[in-house]
Image (tube, coloured by chain):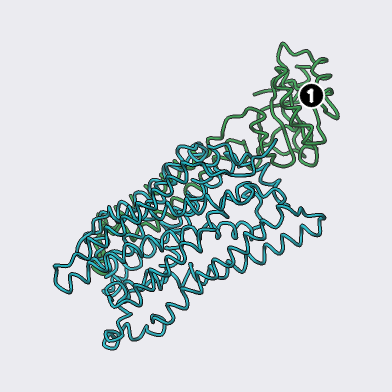
Amino acid sequence: MGVKKFIVGNFYDEEVLFPAVKKTRRAGYKIHDVFTPFPIHGLDKALGLRDTSLHTAGFIFGITGTATAVGFITWALTVDWQINFGGKPYFALPAWIPIAFELTVLFSAIGMVLTFCYLCQLAPFVKKDHFNPRSTDDTFVMAIECTSKTNEAEAISFLQSVGAADVQVMNKETGWWIGRYDKDTIPFAKKAAVAN
Amino acid sequence: MTLREKFEVPKRYNTVAMALMALGILAIVGLYITTHGGGGTAAENKLHDARFWASLLQNSVFFLLVVNAAMFFICATTLAWGGWQLSFIRVAEAVSAVVPVIGVLTLAILFSIAFGDNHTIYHWTDTEHVKHDAILNFKKGFLNKGFYAITSVLAVGLWSFLGWKMRKLSRKLDNAPLKSNEEAKKYVWNNTVWAALYMIVFALTVMSSIPWLWLMSIDAHWFSTMYSWYTFASTWVAGVALITLFIIYLKNNNYLELTNKEHLHEMGIIMFAFSVFWTYLWFSQFMLTWYANIPEETTYFKPRLYGIYGGVFWLMFLINFLAPLLILMTRNSKRNYATLTFMSILIIFGHWLDFFQMVFPGPSPGHVPLIIYDFAIALGFIGLILFVTGKSLSKYPLIAKNHPFLKESVIHHT
């Protein structure tokens, strides 16, 4: 984390963006991320991102839910407080399956939402630096991270050649902080000035 | 890209289909000879005879409902204005073209059972017995031969007719591309109306009356309002598995260029989801009975779960629920031809077994009959499906190339 230097290209069309992403990766630039106003199918593949592990998390949460439900009911109805329901055995598994099912769904749903928020660093009051506010509206923003080997001028002209409508060099904070956009100044702004 | 539009049935394909059909016929003859050898008491002979017809009943009804599920697939996706299925819609259409053929066979078998003088399978056909049986007497407005015959003929007729109509609508575009946007809209609307009609018929037959009449009436004293849904879920999963098998076969023979792993993934999702759906219905039906514990309801589960059919019952649970749940859960397994082929075959077998335990505890409560004949008869029906499907696949272009939604299928992503 911390402030890094980026070359940010703004694309007006997703049909330009896709080949641009491929060319940029082939040219060897390090793409930090691409920001789009809406989800684009296949972009994750074009960017070479690995599959999300959210499914695995969901499975583990689900299994935890099942175990919790079955475990607790078993303990409550066979050990702690045995009640005879219509002559059924104390360990009445068929009757518990709906509850086990519900808890499986509940755990995996809530767990996956929280995991998703964690992975995306989304939470109330958590703020992140924007590259270009228009990426929340109508344009597609690709940020290339500058490393020690990046030639800025070359990268800028490269991005223009693959179809970026405007290209800027920016210093941006990659981590998150807690605060508000309207009242707080971005706490890393000062450091960015130093890095410049 | 040039598309291979014409499917040429390979010689081996037809040979296999013919061989399977021959095996089926041999098995039917063999089973008939074994069950009608005589030598037993009259009651025993009746049971043997019932065992013969039960085998035919199970196989014909199962495979009829499975191929009919292909038309349900087409109509459900059409009604949802889906586009992703269009690259292989002709495969589903070809499978659904088997309905009239197996339909006629099924009707012949059903009527032989209902109008025959052996009432072991359908107790309610015995009018003398019904007079003294309060429950059956109460149900005779529904469970009588006339209603049974009319409903069966109507159902098979309407499935065949509406399926034929849907297929015809689809083929209409092959030589006459749509000229304007307006025409395309009209075409889609027309399709939607016919699909909706089919769906209404489907709801009134497969999802309600038909399984009650054909299968549930074997245990005529017992009833379950969930039965038809459960039967439908069973055949629907198997139907999707059957379509998937044909798609994979054609893909392996370099047909269906526009169909790819994205589409197969979608089929895998349906198989996975509806296996869970089947389990939900299957379990709900059991749990309510188990919880209420009313003798007239538990009679159905007594031989199946605690009796001699327990093994079949649990095997079916393993194949139809645990295996799809665990094996089809990951993304990669749904995109893998080998896994999907294996699971499709397993699912069709599992639901066939489901039908086995629906039918047989009625006429043969004492012992599980030797299943080998039933296998062979099932293979005969599979041969018939292969033969007719191959024939109708080769008759028409493999890709609905002029359908207005085809592009959605080409660019489909999962």
Q: Quadrant of the C terminus of chain A?
A: top right
At a point 74% along the width and 13% down the height, the residue shown is A150
Relative to A12, does residue A67 appear above or below in the rendering? below
SS category of the residue bearing label 1 = strand
Residue A36, given in percent of the width and then of the height, sits at 73, 37
Q: Is residue B87 visible?
A: yes
- Front residue of B61 and A2: B61
Relative to B335, does residue B204 appear above or below in the rendering? below
At a point 56% along the width and 35% down the height, the residue shown is A52
Q: Is residue A110 visible?
A: no
| Circle 1 crowding by C-alpha within 10 Å: few under 14, some 14–19, many from 20 | some
Q: Colour of chain B?
A: cyan
Q: Quadrant of the N terminus of chain A?
A: top right
Chain that bears disc 1: A
Residue A187, given in percent of the width and then of the height, sits at 72, 28
**Image check: A40 left or right of B321?**
right
Judged from this view, the residue extending furthest toward the top is A149
- Front residue of B113 and B346: B113
Relative to A73, does residue A160 appear above or below in the rendering? above
Residue A152, by quadrant, is top right
At a point 63% along the width and 61% down the height, the residue shown is B166
Q: Colour of chain A?
A: green
Q: Amino acid at mark 1?
A: Met
**Image check: A157 left or right of A40?**
right
Relative to B160, does residue B271 appear above or below in the rendering? above
Q: Provide the residue designation for mark 1.
A: A170
Residue B184, by quadrant, is bottom right
